Image (tube, helix red, strand yellow):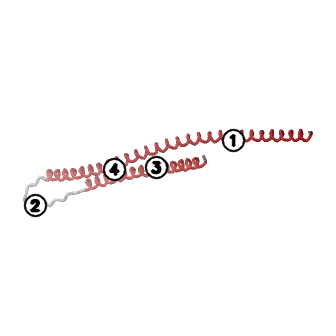
Amino acid sequence: MENEFVLLKKDVDEAYMNKVQLEAKLESLTDEINFLRHLYEEELRELQSQISDTQVVLSMDNNRNLDLDSIIAEVKAQYEDIANKSRAEVESMYQLKYQELQASAGRHGDDLKNTKTEISELNRYITRLQSEIDALKAQRANLEAQIAEAEERGELALKDARSKLSEL
């Protein structure tokens, strides 16, 4: 009975340690998500500043009639296209990583829930065993009292028989 209790206590301790580890991992994953979000925002700001700070220098041959407005518009469109593609790529990578972390956090949440359920079941089992132990202790005490009473009656009967024997 005591070995079983010790084993149950060990299992409860292991479940608690598992719970603590899972909570730490969840916190770590949350921190990683926040870090990646911050990194994404910084990269996005950097790309936008690169786009806005970009200047195009054109050397012109005055002999030609160039439409600078259309050239500037075309270059600007190309840069915006490149920036949009880069932004979309970064956003896609961020979303993928975020989804992976969410799925991992969900799995760890399920593991934590299962561990809590197991701990609860083990606590109920321990309580039931403790009740059984208490009942057995009470039964043992009662039997010991009955044995002591029977021994006392036996001794009295023996003394009575000896006194009657000595009277004869």
Q: Which residue is mark 2?
A: 61
Element type at mark 3: helix
Q: CA distance from mark 4 to mark 1?
A: 63 Å
Element type at mark 2: loop
- The image quadrant of residue 162 is top right
Q: CA distance from mark 2 to mark 1?
A: 113 Å
Horizontally, residue 9 falls left or right of residue 159, namely left
Pointer 3 local density, CA inside 10 Å: few below 14, some 14–19, many at least 20: some
Labels 2, 3: front one = 3
Pointer 2 local density, CA inside 10 Å: few below 14, some 14–19, many at least 20: few
Residue 16 position in % (x across, y down): 52, 48
Query: Which badge, 1 or 3, comes first in the chain's sequence?
Result: 3
Q: Which residue is mark 4?
A: 97
Labels 4, 2: front one = 4
Query: Which badge, 4 or 3, comes first in the chain's sequence?
Result: 3
Residue 29 position in % (x across, y down): 41, 50
Going by the numbered disc 2, the residue's amino acid type is: Asp
Say if mark 4 contacts mark 3, CB within 8 Å: no
Going by the numbered disc 1, the residue's amino acid type is: Arg
Pointer 1 local density, CA inside 10 Å: few below 14, some 14–19, many at least 20: few
Element type at mark 1: helix
Labels 4, 3: front one = 3
Q: Which residue is mark 1?
A: 140
Q: Which mark is residue 22?
A: 3
Labels 1, 3: front one = 1
Going by the numbered disc 4, the residue's amino acid type is: Lys
- The image quadrant of residue 125 is top right
